Amino acid sequence: MRIGKILLLALLVVGFNACKETKEEKKEIVQIEAPVPDPMEFGFNLNDYIVVKDTVRNGDSFGKILEKNNIGYGTVFNIVEQTKDTFDISKIVAGKPYTLLCTKGDSLQRPECFIYQPNSIDYVVIKFKDSINAYKESKPVKIVQKEVSGIITSSLSGALDDAGLSQRLAFDMSDIYAWTIDFFRLQKGDQFKLIYTEKYINDTTFVGIDRIHAAYFKHNNEPFYAFEFETDSVKQIVDYYDENAKNLRRAFLKAPVVFKNVRISSRYNLRRRIKLYGNRIRAHKGTDFAAPRGTPIISTANGVVVESARRGGNGNYVKVKHNSTYTTQYLHMNKRKAKVGDFVKQGDVIGWVGMTGNTSGPHVCYRFWKNGKQVDPFKQKLPDADPIDDKLKIAYLKHIEPLKVQIDSIKIQPPKPAEEELTQQAVTALK
């Protein structure tokens, strides 16, 4: 009986699709004229020129591009000399677009203007028809506020993928909560809500995430709020604080590498057994973060580099003394950047992930000392960062009041059921 019901369901689905296809085949084809592109771009009326759009190719240089378009070497030299204070032409990068505006009526189609786009928003204009000058401009950007929510089923990246959202949000969240949530140990059922802004040009072309203004993350049934606030308008210092104006940062980051493409492959373990050594106990006094070779390694706190060397099983490593209590060490680097005596700030790149020393794969072994003893950093109560100034606290609480109401009103969107789950639900409904 049940098999009959399942077959009936399958026939209904096939029949529905067949009817749908038949109806679609009978539809008339309607031709729609494509909209005429706006002739204004980069501040020029493109109808006044012969326009050449291309991409910088491997081996191209500013000089080669202009010489291929009938601009002599002498003129190229003058352009480079007279515009070097505005734009260094050696910085043009393969894969980036450029535009040449050429004079109409010129049989050689010689350009009189070169426009280079280092990204989707900014561009550099170099004009050289009568006189030579260069300037930098940006396309008008529209900022649009968005809201999003989700539930973790496997990972934060997976939850964002399910919602069709940019992975940039995962990286931004991991930065905001780097000191309060261990993103390597998220739990199934953890929830998040965000208020953020996106950037658009010409009202329709998406050009990236702007920034997160407010966030809510429920981890292990504990809520964590985060609100953006500018504490210094002159220096444009922005940080994130919770609903009680407490700084979310700590004096130490939880990881010496950014969240992208990184996982903890081995934790601090004084009773670890290794097959390679006859299954004997060999203490592991560090935390291994597996990451692709070349991934930047960052200092987890401010401090002074006291060692930078290559030695034995450690391979290339850097050791940073933060104060009289804390010291950190970063092993197996492919290459070191920081030198002995350098003062490094939290988040500064001090080297790159490699496989030097005793290691079976690319990773950084992160070691942590407290009062001269190696400890597990994940089990330490680390000091907080500086709190918000009392003079700004009232302004901050007033600033977040509407944001908290807004983020609390966002409903958590449940994850979409997998295709096999939908099929099972349909079968169950017929039983």
Image (tube, rainbow, N blue to C red):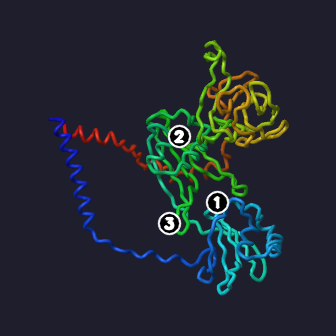
47, 272: nearer the viewer: 47
Q: Earlier in the sequence, mark 2 or mark 3?
A: 3
Image position of 37 with respect to 13: above or below: below
* Residue under pointer 1: 95
Let me know if residue 89 appears in the view: yes
**Marks 2/1: CA distance?**
41 Å
* Residue under pointer 2: 224
Residue 166: horizontal and vertical position, in percent? 52, 51
Tell me which amino acid carries mark 3.
Answer: Thr
Q: How packed is label 3: few (under 14 Cα within 10 Å), some, or many (20 or more)?
A: few
Let me know if residue 328 appears in the view: no
Q: Residue at x 62, y 20 (%)?
A: 269
Q: Secondary structure at mark 3?
A: loop
Does the CB distance between marks 1 and 3 fall below 8 Å?
no
User: Could you say which quadrant of the image residue 278 lies in?
Assistant: top right
**Marks 2/3: CA distance?**
34 Å
Residue 370: horizontal and vertical position, in percent? 72, 25
Residue 431: horizontal and vertical position, in percent? 19, 36
* Residue under pointer 3: 204
Instruction: Single out the mark in the foreground, 2 or 3.
Output: 3
Tell me which amino acid carries mark 2.
Answer: Phe
Please identify the residue farthest to the bottom as the structure is shown: 105
Quadrant into which the N terminus falls: top left
